[in-house]
Every structure is written in structure tokens, then in C-alpha cells.
Amino acid sequence: MKHSPVLLKNAAIISQNQTAEKKSILIQDNRISQILSENEIIDISSEQVFDLQDAELYAGFIDIHNHGAIGIDVNNANADDLHKASKFLAAKGVTAWLPTLVPDTDENYAKTIKAIDQLMQTQDGREPAARVLGVHYEGPFVSEKMCGALRTQFFKSFKTGDEVENLPKLKNGIHLTTLAPEVENGIELIKELRKQDWIVSIGHTKADFQTLENAFNAGAKHLTHFFNAMTGLHHREIGVVGWGLAKKEVTFDIIADGVHVHPQMLKFAFDYKTSENLILISDSVSPTGLGDGDFEIWGEKISVAGGKTQNERGSIAGSVITMLDAFKMFQSLGVSPSEISKMASLNPARLLGREQTHGSIKVGKRADLVAIDEKGNIKLVLIGGEKI
Ligand SMILES: [Zn+2]
């Protein structure tokens, strides 16, 4: 779709390798077409001009682990529901996301994949909202011993190629899955998924050191919600956490709500692994945006109190934060805007193979942008140059 050009004036651009620089940005055909210094004047009469009054301008956040919000649960959503969730997320600075499925019946898997397909095919024509880029299957090939809030009755084991063939796939889009490499034939499973171009992330696991090494060599180079649903660090048993910290080339994502992981542990992970290797996620669930109360998700009652979720089994059942809260959490830990931007936008784009078009503010990239004022409020969100 073609749109008239948009000009953003007085933007303090947050880029990955320097502090804020005051510039203007010209957007044409959904993309950043020029980055202009402060006093350059361009002569386009039809432009829509937004004066950002020195607000910080970030590449839009990309949430690769999100189960829904405002009462919408990805596992039970149709295309319109997903679009509603996308609009809510966009208002919080998220410009792209992966709806994330928990283990479910084959029928429900198929239904949801169809809904995601439908939304992906129609999102160009809909009101601007965070773009769905694909799907994240959290499970079903995960460890019962590290199930967290996932329902073990829907876990699968991998014996032949069939189980993978039977996982419904999108017509067009990114497939990411979280799996435990120690499941039966887990390493073969990783190889098979990599052959089909899936991104494989290790999680809900208690794999030992050698299995993790084998998984890495088979193509699983990322870890899901680091520290949560995995074995911890011990000096005689390195654990998944120990491996994730020690293995330089491994990246991981982390739920930055201050509940799943203590804020000082977030800071430790950041200090140790650096912003190059961390991705912020929300792992939000459907009650996000609805405040405290009792809700039902995934066939269980969960209560939300003071920003903390709990199911009847006593497990934390996802978060009720958005990427904006994750952003603010790292801000409160004293992390610089450019480093937060890497973790919230560039690194997820890189993991998803979308670095050419997403994740930073550069000429030629999609105009998925978020302006945040000095009070931390969102001033403007553009999705492909369109204002929400
Ligand atoms: Zn999750």
C-alpha cells in the first residue's frame, strides 16, 4: 500500500552505537527514506509532519514470546481477536510480535495457525497494529519436569518425522519453537526443524551439558525465558543456566517483569552476557492490560495480584507486562537507551532473520518507530509509517 510521505521532526534518534542524535526522518512507502540533519529542509508539500519535540525515537519493540493480552488468549483467538491484541500491543510500542502457543490439542493448534495465517494475509488492509511475523510454538516437545504452567497432557515426544510433519504450519511466516533437547530423539528433532527453516530455542528443559552442546551443534543457539523452567547453576552440575552463561555464542531471552527473575538477576545477566546476547520478552498472558482479578487461561484458574500471576498448581503463569514495562525495568537498572534498544528491537529482529528490514532506525528499513518522551510516556507509534 502506498501512503503519502511522513516527516518526523526533532527526533532524538536512539541508535545502537551512539547516544541520542537530533534528526528528522522522512518516511515514504512504509520505509525510512531519509535521515536528515536538524536544519535540512525538504520540499514535500503533502507530507504529514509530526514534531516529536526532542522525544527519544526507538525502533519498534519486537516481542517474540507473547500469549495474548486484554482478555485475548492466542490459543483461542481468531484473526480479529489477534488483530485486537495487536492494536493493544502497538499502543505499548510493540510493532511486531510472534503470537505464542502453549501445548494444545491438534485441533486447536490447527485452528490457531489458520487464524494467524488469516491475519497475516489481511493485516496490510487493516487498521495499523503490531505486525504478526509468524508463530512461536512453546512446546509441545518439552520436559514434563520443567513444565511451568504448560499442560503436560499435550506434550509430544518425537519418534519419527511424523510428529513434526503434523504440527500445523503457516503458509508464509516465521516458525520459532521452544523445545527441550533431552526429549526422545531431541537432537534429530532439532536437525529436522532446522532443515525446515524453523528457529529452535532451548527451554522448559533440564538437559545436561553434553546434550546442550549437541543441541547447539544441531542448530539450537538460543534459550527461552532464561532462568525460568530450566536447571540452575551448580558447581558440580553446570545446569542449563550455567551453560547459557558460559557458552559465549548462545543468546537468550528473559522475562523482564521483576517477578520471574529478580531485578538484580536481570542486571547480572545483562552485565555478564552484554546487550549483544539478550532479548527482552514479555511472556504476557491474556489478562495483561486488565488489572488484578481472577481469570481462566489454558483450562485453569489464575489469579493476578500486584502484577503477579499464579495458577492453581502454584506456578507463575506468564506475566502481565508489555515490552514497555520490560524496557522501563532495564531503564531502572541503569542500562542505557541504546543498549535497551538492542535487546528490545535489534536482537529479536536478528534472531528472526529480519535484521535487513526491522530492529533499528536506518534508511531502507521499515518505519516501525516508537517515540518516548522524557517521562517515559509513548508519544507516537508508527507501523510501516502509519500512525496508530
Ligand atoms: Zn510462555
Image (cartoon, grey):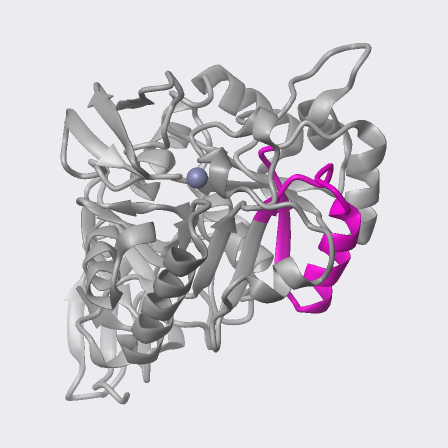
In the image, is 178 to the left or to the right of 149?
A: right
- Examine the rendering and report whether any part of residue 37 can be seen: no
Which of these two is toward me, 185 or 26?
A: 185
Q: In the image, residue 162 lies at what x, y percent?
A: 66, 63
Which of these two is toward me, 62 or 180?
A: 180
Q: In the image, residue 270 lies at what x, y percent?
A: 57, 29
Q: Quadrant of ligand 1?
A: top left
Q: Is residue 109 magenta?
A: no
In the image, is 363 to the left or to the right of 121?
A: right
Query: Quadrant location of residue 245?
Result: top right
Position of the C terminus, as image quadrant, is: bottom left
- Examine the rendering and report whether any part of residue 274 can be seen: yes
Residue at coordinates 62% horizontally, 66% vertically from top-left?
165
Residue at coordinates 43% horizontally, 66% vertically from top-left?
133
Q: In the image, residue 243 lies at what x, y percent?
A: 75, 28
| Residue 3 in the image: above or below residue 262 | below
Residue at coordinates 52% horizontally, 23% vertically from top-left?
267
Residue at coordinates 52% horizontally, 66% vertically from top-left?
174
The range drawn in magenta is 178-204
